[in-house]
Image (cartoon, rainbow, N blue to C red):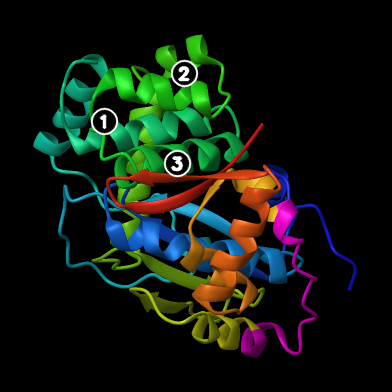
């Protein structure tokens, strides 16, 4: 198939797809960050067939409720109610911008999503880069503002929404979905097909790309892969990348990935940067 330019719009398309994947994440979970290259490749190759829905999983509640795996069954009658103390904590947090807590980061993601799904996914990636690459405290309000600016959000709107009841309630809704699907850890992916009678396939943790690929192929039935973008297009899209990430996506060795990146460094297309968590490559603009 012909190559596509994967803009942010491809990540949160609204049209119906044969597969919907609920991705349960925690912004401070290292394994969620480690899963990102796999998600990128999955969307680039199977974006015609899948739609990703990010659901935030917090540590506020641990509930033992009946599994209700298909999203169509998540009705108001089956939703789990948050305990009064937990709801009050979220309410206090949205009103107090100086509060230092991982929950404020989750609420901030929901505030970003109020500007659109693609804005929310951009903000989440920016937040994770600040945490895992630069080891900054993403529970600080000032850092959240910087992330919103880098993700090209409307900053005034974001600062207003992060204190709104809408963002807090959206996060509470994600927690309820996590409870209904009995998601206890992150990352967790739950795959649903078009048949509402079928239960979802739940995958907890991080596995080789081939595991997720096999699930997609079995649930869709002989899907046709889209061609991956060129390495230059990939770098242009994501700005900061690591050699292992490039190796995974293009199915090459880490040594080959580093060779490709060094070649582009000599061409003055990228620069090598050293951060607290390793060496990365950043596009030169």
Q: Which residues are magenta?
A: 217-233
| Pick the front one: 35 or 169 | 35
* Residue 99 visible (yes or no): yes
Earlier in the chain: of badge 3 and badge 1, it is 1
Give the Cα distance between marks 2 and 1: 13 Å
Report the number of numbered marks.
3
Name the residue tied to disc 2: 158
Element assignment for label 2:
helix
Label 1: few (<14), some (14–19) or many (≥20) C-alpha neighbours in 10 Å: many
Which SS class for mark 3?
helix
Was residue 199 drawn as part of the magenta stretch in this picture? no
Q: Which residue is the site of mark 1?
A: 104
Give the alpha-carbon distance from disc 3 to disc 1, as whole Å: 13 Å
Vertical placement of 107 versus 252: above or below? above
Going 38% across and 56% down the picture, which residue do you hit?
Answer: 33
Quarter of image, res 193: bottom right
Residue 232 is one of the magenta-drawn residues: yes
Badge nearest the viewer, 3 or 1: 3
The first of marks 2 and 1 along the sequence is: 1
Question: Residue 285 falls in which quadrant of the image?
Answer: top right
Question: Which residue does the image show at 44% across and 54% down from the upper left?
Answer: 75
Disc 3: which residue: 124
């Amino acid at each position: 198939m012909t190559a596509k330019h994967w803009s942010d719009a491809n990540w949160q398309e609204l049209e119906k797809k044969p597969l919907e994947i609920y991705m349960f994440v925690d912004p401070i979970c290292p394994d969620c960050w480690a899963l990102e290259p796999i998600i990128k490749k999955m969307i680039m190759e199977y974006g015609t067939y899948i739609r990703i829905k990010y659901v935030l999983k917090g540590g506020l509640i641990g509930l033992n409720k009946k599994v209700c795996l298909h999203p169509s069954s998540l009705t108001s009658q089956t939703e789990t109610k948050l305990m009064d103390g937990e709801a009050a904590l979220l309410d206090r947090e949205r009103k107090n911008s100086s509060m230092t807590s991982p929950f404020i980061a989750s609420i901030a993601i929901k505030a970003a999503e109020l500007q659109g799904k693609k804005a929310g996914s951009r903000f989440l990636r920016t937040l994770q880069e600040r945490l895992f690459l630069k080891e900054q405290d993403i529970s600080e309000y000032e850092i959240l503002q910087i992330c919103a600016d880098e993700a090209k959000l409307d900053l005034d709107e974001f600062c207003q929404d992060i204190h709104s009841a809408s963002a807090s309630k959206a996060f509470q809704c994600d927690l309820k979905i996590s409870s209904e699907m009995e998601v206890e850890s992150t990352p967790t992916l739950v795959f649903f097909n078009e048949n509402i009678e079928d239960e979802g396939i739940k995958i907890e943790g991080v596995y080789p790309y081939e595991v997720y690929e096999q699930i997609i192929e079995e649930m869709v039935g002989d899907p046709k892969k889209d061609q991956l973008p060129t390495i230059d297009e990939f770098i242009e899209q994501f700005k900061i990348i690591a050699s292992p990430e490039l190796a995974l996506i293009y199915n090459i060795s880490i040594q080959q990935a580093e060779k490709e990146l060094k070649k582009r460094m000599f061409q003055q297309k990228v620069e090598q940067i050293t951060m607290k968590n390793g060496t990365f490559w950043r596009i030169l603009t």
